Image (spheres, grey):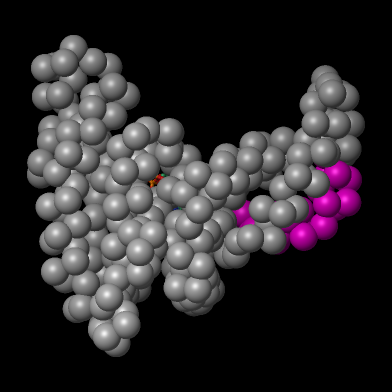
Amino acid sequence: VTQDAGSAEGKKQPVVVICIGMAGSGKTTLMQRLNSHLHSKNTPPYILNLDPAVSHMPYSANIDIRDTVDYKEVMKQYNLGPNGGILTALNLFTTKFDQVLGYVEKRAEDVDYVLVDTPGQIEIFTWSASGSIITDAIASSLPTVVAYIVDTPRTTAPATFMSNMLYACSILYKTRLPFIIVFNKTDVQPHDFALEWMQDFEAYQAALNDSARNESGESGYMNSLMGSMCLVLEEFYNNLRAVGVSAMTGEGMRAFFDAVEEARREYETDY
Ligand code: GDP
Ligand code: MG
């Protein structure tokens, strides 16, 4: 990743926040919340929507993949199902991404934040060539951080929590970008249990044992695997920041933007 000459000349550069997360974790709702928060601070962001299949978008994007490709048309034309249509739409858009980046760069001096929303289904972005190409193109042009959005109420079971963290971990090592875990929906479920599990593997293992006792069907093998995984993830946990937010109520915005600032500094020293 090259540092663009702009920063050396003292030109202001925005930070790009790429929102990634499982379907329904609240990426789009968080984008809306961040957008209205930044508007209220008089620093409106520049917004890219990369989800071709979003039906209701609660914010208006500066660049919207849906203006370029219609994934339903793509499905018909190439005889694909919905996931194939979305992936192909993203691929088609990626072939024009140098132009898109040109637009972003033109506005770079006027904005503090560039926010990027990604397709609902996480793997369409994280396990596709297009997702990597887009991420790398953005990150080689501007300071870029990844916000990994977690559906906190749906990750309270220790095994589910571990799966989600392993997925996040794979994205961190794939993108090698500064990383923020965003525990969303704290209005429904506070994220303190998650922070405790990340900081204290004995607390995690105790929760794992409790859940095994409750669902007597849980296999000992699964538990011992998850127990070992939490030790593996210690290194990963040390490499990121974790914040709790509610995209619904706006709780946690301060912590979120502090984490973005910290992640941006990491980008500037390491990339
Ligand atoms: P995406 O697929 O990741 O873009 O998720 P969406 O933003 O479309 O949100 C999925 C669902 O979660 C919607 O019904 C949202 O209203 C809901 N949601 C998102 N954020 C929050 C939140 O902070 N609190 C609550 N209670 N619901 C939320
Ligand atoms: Mg969405």
Magenta extent:
189-208
Q: Residue furthest bottom?
A: 10
Q: Above or below — where is 269 with respect to 131?
A: below
Q: Position of residue 164 (x, y in %)?
A: 60, 41
Which residue is located at x 26 percent, y 45 percent? Answer: 50
Q: State the residue in front, 67 or 172.
A: 172
Q: Position of residue 218 (x, y in %)?
A: 81, 24
Q: Position of residue 138 (x, y in %)?
A: 30, 56
Q: Is residue 111 magenta?
A: no
Q: Is residue 224 left or right of residue 18?
A: right
Residue 15: name its quadrant: bottom left
Q: Above or below — where is 31 with respect to 45?
A: above
Q: State the residue in front, 185 or 88.
A: 88
Which residue is located at x 54 percent, y 50 percent? Answer: 172
Q: Position of residue 203 (x, y in %)?
A: 85, 52
Q: Above or below — where is 27 with respect to 157?
A: below
Q: State the residue in front, 77 or 27.
A: 77
**Overall secondary structure of the magenta stretch?**
helix
The quadrant the N terminus occupies is bottom left
Total number of numbered discs in the rendering: 0
Q: Is residue 93 left or right of residue 181?
A: left
Q: Is residue 244 left or right of residue 217?
A: left
Residue 9: name its quadrant: bottom left
Which residue is located at x 24 percent, y 55 percent? Answer: 48
Q: Is residue 191 magenta?
A: yes
